[in-house]
C-alpha cells in the first residue's frame, strides 16, 4: 500500500489537523471526567448546593462543547481526506483507461472496469474517512487516559496494561481474514457487473436466440455468490465486534472489582478517585474498541484498494506520446516502415507493413474479414502502438508528437460511430473540440445530410441522444460522424467503411462527403466495396495480417490470386 502512504504524506496538513484535534479531544475527555466527578462529589458526598457546582458546571458545558466540536472537525477532515483520495484514484484510473490502446479499452471487460471505477473506489472511502482518523485518535486518546489513570491509581493502570493488548491482537487476526474476504467480495462484485453489462448489451441477440432465460440464471448464480461473499464479510464483522465488547467488558469489570476492594474492604481510596477511574476506564476501552471496528472497515477498504491499484499498476501497452508540436498547413507526409502489431503475448500478428503516403494520397486497406485491416487503421491513427518498426509523420516518429497535436488533424469515421450521452449539438461539436459557431455547425450538418433531421426533431439541435435520450439509425450515425469530420476539417481522414448496407441516400452523402474531405486530406480507408478499392491510389491487400500485395487495382488483379478471387466474387454481388 505504498500509494496510500504517499497520499497521506501529500495530505500532511489534513493529517496534522486530525492529530491536533485528537490531542484536544484527549484533554477534553479527561477534563469532562474530572468536572463531572467534581460535581457529583460536591453534591452527593459533600452535600453542596448549586453555588458550589456553578463553576464546574459551566466549565463542563464548555468542555462538552469543545469535545463535540473537535469530534466534528475530525470527522469532516476525514471525509475531505477520503474525497481527495477517491479523486486521485479515479483520475489515475481514468488516465490509465484513456491511455490504454484500443484493444484493451474497447468493449473488453467494460463492466469489470466500470465496477472498479465506481464501486471499488467508493469502498476505499472508509479507510480515509474512518480508519485513518480513528487510528490517530486511538493512539493519542488512550495514551493520555492511561497516563492519567497511572498517576491517580497504579493498580488500575496495571490491569489496563495486562488486558488491553488482547484487543489489538484480536483485531489483527480478524483483520487479516477480513481483507481476504473483502477482496473476494470485490472480485465477485466485478464479475457480477461484468456479466450484467455483457448481457444488457447483448440483450437483443440473446432474445433472438432465446438465451435470455439462461442468462438470467447466470446473473442469479453470480449475484448469489456476491451475496455469500458479502455475508462472509459481515459475519466476521459481527464476530469481531462481539469479541471486542466481551474483552473490554471483562477488563472494565476487573478494574471496577479492584476499585471496589480498595474503596470498601481496604478503605485506602476516596470516592473522587474511584469514580474518576471508573469514568476514564470505559473511555479508554471505548477508543481501543472503536479502533477495532475501524480496523475491520479499514481492512475491507484495503481489499477494494488493492483491486484499484492492481488495475492502475497493470503494465501499460498504450501509446506513449511525446511533447513535439505538429503544425500543419496541408496534409502531412506519412511513412510506415515495417510497422507490426501483436495482440497480447501470442495473439493476432499484423505486419510488417511499409508504405509511403505522399500528402493527399488515397490508400485503401483491403482483405478478407479478420485479416487485420482495422488493426492497421488503429496503428496509423495512433490508437494502438506499433510493436516493431515505425510510423513517421513529417519525418518524425508519430509517438514523438503530443497526442492532441496529432489528433487535432485526424478524423476517424468508424463503422459504428459512438454517440455520447448529450444533445445532438454536443455530439457534433465534439468534432471541433467543442468550439464552433452556430453557422459552422449548420454548414457541417447540411454537408453531412443531417440538417433535415434536426428540423424534424421537436428540440432540434438540443435533442438528447445516447443514454437516456433518443437513439439514431445506422445511417444517421454515419452522417453524424461525417458532420463531426466536416467541423474538424482534418488533414487525415481514416474511414472504416460500413460493411452493412446503408440506404442509397446515405451512400450518396457518404461518397460525396468523402470526395470533398479528400480534396485537402490524406484518406486511409478500410475498404469493403469494390468501388472504393478501385478508386484508391494505392491498395494494401492483407492476408492473415501479412501484406499479400501492394499497388493499384490493376497491378494487384494481375499478380495476387487471392485479391483477384475476392474482387471477382464481390463484383458479382455489388451494384456499382
Ligand atoms: N482486442 C483484441 N484482442 C485480441 N485479438 C483481437 C482484438 N481485436 C481483434 N483481434 C483479432 O485480430 C484479428 C484482426 O482483426 P481486425 O479487426 O483487424 O480484422 P479486420 O480485417 O478489420 O476484420 P473485419 O473486416 O471483419 O472488420 C482478428 O483475428 C481478431 O480476432
Image (cartoon, helix red, strand yellow):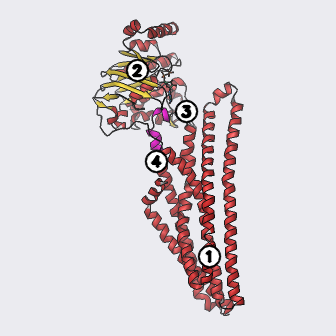
CB-based contact (under 8 Å), mark 4 and mark 1: no
Real-space Cα distance between discs 1 and 2?
Answer: 82 Å
Q: Secondary structure at mark 1?
A: helix
Q: Residues within 10 Å of mark 4 (few under 14, many from 20)?
A: few
Mark nearer the viewer, 4 or 2: 4
Q: Earlier in the sequence, mark 1 or mark 2?
A: 1
Q: Earlier in the sequence, mark 4 or mark 3?
A: 4
Q: Which residues are magenta?
A: 90-106
Real-space Cα distance between discs 4 and 1?
Answer: 46 Å
Q: Give the residue pinned by disc 3.
A: 458
Q: Residue 160 shows which numbered tag?
A: 1
Residue at the (29%, 25%) spot, across then down: 333
Q: Give the residue pinned by disc 4.
A: 91
Q: Quadrant of residue 63?
A: bottom right
Position of 428 with respect to 197 (left or right) is left
Residue at the (43%, 36%) spot, across then down: 318
Q: Quadrant of residue 376?
A: top left
Residue at the (70%, 39%) spot, across then down: 221
Real-space Cα distance between discs 1 and 3?
Answer: 75 Å
Q: Earlier in the sequence, mark 1 or mark 3?
A: 1
Q: Residues within 10 Å of mark 2 (few under 14, many from 20)?
A: some
Q: Give the residue pinned by disc 2.
A: 514
Q: Secondary structure at mark 3?
A: loop
CB-based contact (under 8 Å), mark 4 and mark 2: no
Question: Does the stretch in magenta take in 220?
Answer: no
* Residue 22, percent from left and from top: 52, 71
Between residues 463 and 283, which one lies in front from this camera angle? Answer: 283
Amino acid at each position: 500500500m505504498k500509494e496510500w502512504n504517499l497520499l497521506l504524506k501529500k495530505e500532511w496538513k489534513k493529517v496534522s489537523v486530525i492529530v491536533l484535534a485528537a490531542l484536544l479531544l484527549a484533554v477534553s475527555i479527561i477534563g469532562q471526567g474530572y468536572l463531572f466527578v467534581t460535581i457529583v462529589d460536591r453534591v452527593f458526598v459533600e452535600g453542596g448546593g448549586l453555588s458550589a457546582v456553578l463553576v464546574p458546571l459551566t466549565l463542563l458545558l464548555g468542555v462538552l462543547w469543545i469535545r463535540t466540536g473537535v469530534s466534528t472537525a475530525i470527522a469532516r477532515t476525514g471525509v475531505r481526506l477520503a474525497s481527495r483520495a477517491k479523486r486521485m484514484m479515479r483520475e489515475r484510473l481514468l488516465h490509465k483507461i484513456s491511455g490504454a490502446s484500443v484493444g484493451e479499452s474497447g468493449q473488453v471487460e467494460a463492466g469489470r472496469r466500470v465496477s472498479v471505477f465506481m464501486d471499488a473506489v467508493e469502498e476505499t472511502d472508509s479507510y480515509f474517512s474512518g480508519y485513518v482518523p480513528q487510528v490517530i485518535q486511538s493512539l493519542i486518546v488512550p495514551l493520555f487516559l492511561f497516563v492519567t489513570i497511572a498517576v491517580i491509581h497504579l493498580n488500575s493502570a496495571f490491569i489496563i496494561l495486562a488486558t488491553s493488548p488482547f484487543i489489538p491482537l484480536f483485531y489483527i487476526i480478524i483483520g487479516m481474514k477480513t481483507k481476504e474476504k473483502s477482496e473476494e467480495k470485490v472480485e465477485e462484485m466485478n464479475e457480477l457487473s461484468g456479466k450484467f453489462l455483457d448481457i444488457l448489451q447483448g440483450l437483443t441477440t440473446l432474445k433472438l436466440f432465446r438465451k435470455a432465460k439462461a442468462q438470467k440464471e447466470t446473473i442469479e448464480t453470480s449475484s448469489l455468490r456476491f451475496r455469500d461473499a458479502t455475508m462472509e464479510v459481515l459475519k466476521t464483522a459481527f464476530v469481531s465486534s462481539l469479541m471486542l465488547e466481551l474483552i473490554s467488558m471483562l477488563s472494565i469489570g476487573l478494574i471496577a472489582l479492584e476499585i471496589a476492594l480498595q474503596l470498601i474492604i481496604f478503605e485506602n481510596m476516596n470516592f473522587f478517585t474511584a469514580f474518576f477511574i471508573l469514568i476514564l476506564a470505559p473511555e479508554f476501552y471505548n477508543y481501543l474498541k472503536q479502533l477495532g471496528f475501524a480496523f475491520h472497515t479499514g481492512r475491507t477498504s484495503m481489499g477494494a484498494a488493492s483491486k484499484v491499484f492492481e488495475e492502475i499498476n497493470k503494465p501499460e501497452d498504450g501509446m506513449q506520446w511525446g511533447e513535439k508540436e505538429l503544425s500543419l498547413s496541408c496534409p502531412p507526409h506519412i511513412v510506415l516502415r515495417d510497422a507490426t502489431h501483436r495482440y497480447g503475448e501470442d495473439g493476432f500478428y499484423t505486419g510488417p507493413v511499409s508504405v509511403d503516403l505522399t500528402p493527399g494520397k488515397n490508400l485503401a486497406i483491403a482483405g478478407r474479414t479478420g485479416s487485420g485491416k482495422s488493426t492497421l487503421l488503429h496503428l496509423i491513427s495512433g490508437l494502438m502502438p506499433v510493436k516493431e518498426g515505425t510510423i513517421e509523420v513529417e519525418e518524425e516518429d508519430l509517438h514523438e508528437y503530443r497526442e492532441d497535436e496529432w489528433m487535432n488533424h485526424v478524423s476517424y469515421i468508424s463503422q459504428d460511430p459512438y454517440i455520447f450521452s448529450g444533445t445532438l449539438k454536443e455530439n457534433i461539436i465534439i468534432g471541433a473540440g467543442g468550439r464552433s459557431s452556430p453557422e459552422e455547425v449548420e454548414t457541417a450538418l447540411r454537408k453531412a445530410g443531417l440538417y433535415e433531421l434536426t428540423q424534424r426533431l421537436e428540440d432540434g439541435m438540443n435533442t438528447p441522444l445516447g443514454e437516456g435520450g433518443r437513439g439514431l439509425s445506422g445511417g444517421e450515425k454515419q452522417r453524424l460522424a461525417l458532420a463531426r469530420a466536416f467541423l474538424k476539417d482534418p488533414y487525415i481522414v481514416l474511414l472504416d467503411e460500413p460493411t452493412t448496407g446503408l440506404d442509397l441516400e446515405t451512400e450518396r452523402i457518404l461518397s460525396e462527403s468523402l470526395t470533398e474531405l479528400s480534396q485537402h486530406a490524406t484518406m486511409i480507408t478500410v475498404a469493403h466495396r469494390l468501388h472504393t478499392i478501385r478508386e484508391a491510389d494505392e491498395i494494401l491487400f492483407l492476408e492473415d495480417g501479412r501484406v499479400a500485395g501492394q499497388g493499384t487495382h490493376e497491378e494487384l488483379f494481375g499478380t495476387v490470386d487471392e485479391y483477384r478471387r475476392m474482387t471477382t466474387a464481390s463484383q458479382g454481388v455489388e451494384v456499382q
